[in-house]
Image (cartoon, rainbow, N blue to C red):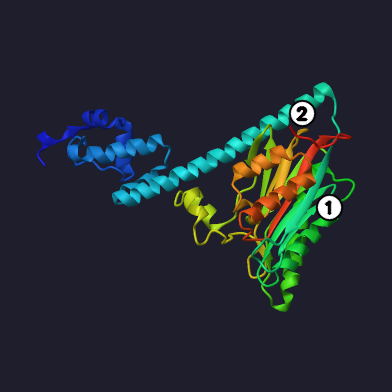
């Protein structure tokens, strides 16, 4: 190409909205090479046809994409590049959501500390109920649901020995359902108990039968709830009329959603929607559970459930039932009934627990 047809680095920077300094860096990184470099002065010249790639680089930088990933995107065909950008942005949104959750948690925690220091300590307790049902299709119930003064748990077993697997996992945690739980070490206690649950599930399978289970449980300290979660059972928080899912499914389709390769709507009908990426079970490597600590407020309502509820009853309907049915026992039965009204294709288990002031009954408007 004739030098007269080329753009100087300054003109190219203006047209592409990149600075000359950035263009020199991208040349060094082999991200955007100039069309010609003057052998005597080292001055860089660019072809007008490079503007499209330069603008793409500029836009990707505005997204915050790392340079190494930009280089990979620029080397792809348009359709593949679009998929890569979508996957990158899905990851950004997931990270942002996690940071948002942390910010909300910190604000809530500091607000509670401030409230306690100003008004004195409010004694809280739980009002709770659990219910498990076989459903209308499965021949046996492989779920286990438990609610006690300190421990709430749901486990969804799978495989020929799924029922004893879920029961063994919950049974291993019941040692924590004691009168006193030291808040400072509650997450460590839960983590140790889950290791015991893993061994218990593997003992069930020692006869050669496949056994595995999900496990979602919370431990009550008197002011906080410590959550442990592995698999695709779920925990929800109903607060001020809003329903928030506080667990993240460990499934293949959820991983694909996180990577931007699948929409939630597509995931609902995906043939591998029940395929777990984490569980307690035989034949699977030990997987680290999710562990979190939540500050509670009077009026909070928590729901733990197996996917026999979450996979068939829309969240809007779940929220409606949790809001409108004040008694925990009536609420769990209404939720199980809703799952069966939707066809009851799976075992369904629910635990509902209300955070109330000591001596106060559960009640919702």
For residue 361, side relative to residue 293 (left or right)? right
Image location (x, y in percent) of residue 330? 77, 46
Q: Residue at x 32, y 42 (%)?
A: 28
Q: Nearer the viewer, residue 358 or 319?
A: 319
Where the C terminus falls, by quadrant? top right
Quadrant of the image containing the N terminus: top left
Which dot marks residue 56?
A: none
User: Against 280, is 218 above or below?
Assistant: above
- Residue 192 visible in the snapshot: no
Horizontally, is 33 left or right of 102 in the view?
left
Circle 2 sits in a helix, a strand or a loop, which is it? helix
Q: Nearer the viewer, residue 59 or 163?
A: 163
Q: Position of residue 234 (x, y in %)?
A: 66, 50
- Residue 162 image position (x, y, % from top left): 70, 67
Residue found at x 77% / y 64%: 168
Front one among 265 and 223: 265
User: Can you give x and y, in whole percent of width and height, for residue 281 in the image?
Assistant: 67, 66
Per the rendering, the mark at residue 113 is 2
3D distance between C-alphas at marks 1 and 2:
26 Å
Quarter of the image where one finds residue 43: top left
Label 1 sits on residue:
176
- Within-10-Å neighbours for mark 1: few <14, some 14–19, many 20+: some
């Amino acid at each position: 190409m004739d030098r007269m047809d080329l753009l100087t680095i300054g003109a190219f920077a203006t047209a592409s909205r990149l600075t000359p300094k950035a263009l020199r860096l991208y040349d060094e990184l082999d991200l955007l090479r100039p069309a010609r470099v003057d052998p005597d002065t080292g001055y860089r010249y660019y072809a007008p046809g490079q503007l499209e790639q330069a603008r793409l680089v500029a836009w990707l930088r505005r997204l915050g994409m790392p340079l190494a990933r930009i280089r990979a995107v620029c080397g792809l065909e348009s359709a593949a590049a679009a998929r890569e950008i979508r996957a990158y942005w899905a990851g950004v949104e997931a990270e942002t959501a996690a940071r948002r959750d942390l910010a909300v948690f910190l604000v809530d925690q500091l607000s509670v500390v401030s409230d306690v220091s100003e008004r004195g300590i409010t004694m809280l307790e739980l009002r709770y109920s659990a219910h498990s049902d076989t459903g209308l299709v499965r021949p046996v119930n492989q779920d286990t649901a438990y609610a006690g003064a300190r421990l709430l748990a749901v486990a969804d077993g799978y495989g020929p020995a799924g029922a004893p697997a879920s029961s063994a996992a919950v049974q291993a945690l019941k040692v924590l359902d004691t009168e006193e739980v030291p808040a400072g070490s509650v997450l460590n206690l839960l983590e140790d108990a889950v290791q015991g649950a893993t061994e218990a599930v593997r003992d069930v399978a020692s006869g050669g039968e496949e056994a595995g289970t999900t496990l979602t449980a919370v431990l009550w300290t008197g002011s906080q709830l410590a959550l442990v979660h592995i698999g695709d059972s779920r925990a929800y928080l109903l607060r001020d009329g809003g329903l928030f899912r506080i667990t993240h499914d460990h499934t293949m389709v959820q991983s694909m959603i996180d990577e931007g390769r699948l929409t939630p709507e597509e995931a609902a009908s995906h043939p591998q929607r029940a395929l777990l990426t984490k569980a307690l079970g035989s034949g699977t490597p030990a997987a680290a559970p999710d562990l979190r600590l939540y500050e509670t407020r009077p009026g909070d309502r928590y729901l733990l459930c197996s996917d026999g509820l979450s996979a068939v009853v829309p969240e809007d309907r779940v929220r409606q039932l949790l809001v409108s049915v004040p008694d925990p026992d009536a609420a769990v039965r209404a939720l199980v009934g809703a799952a069966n009204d939707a066809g009851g294709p799976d075992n369904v288990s629910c635990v509902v627990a209300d955070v109330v002031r000591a001596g106060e009954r559960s009640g919702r408007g």
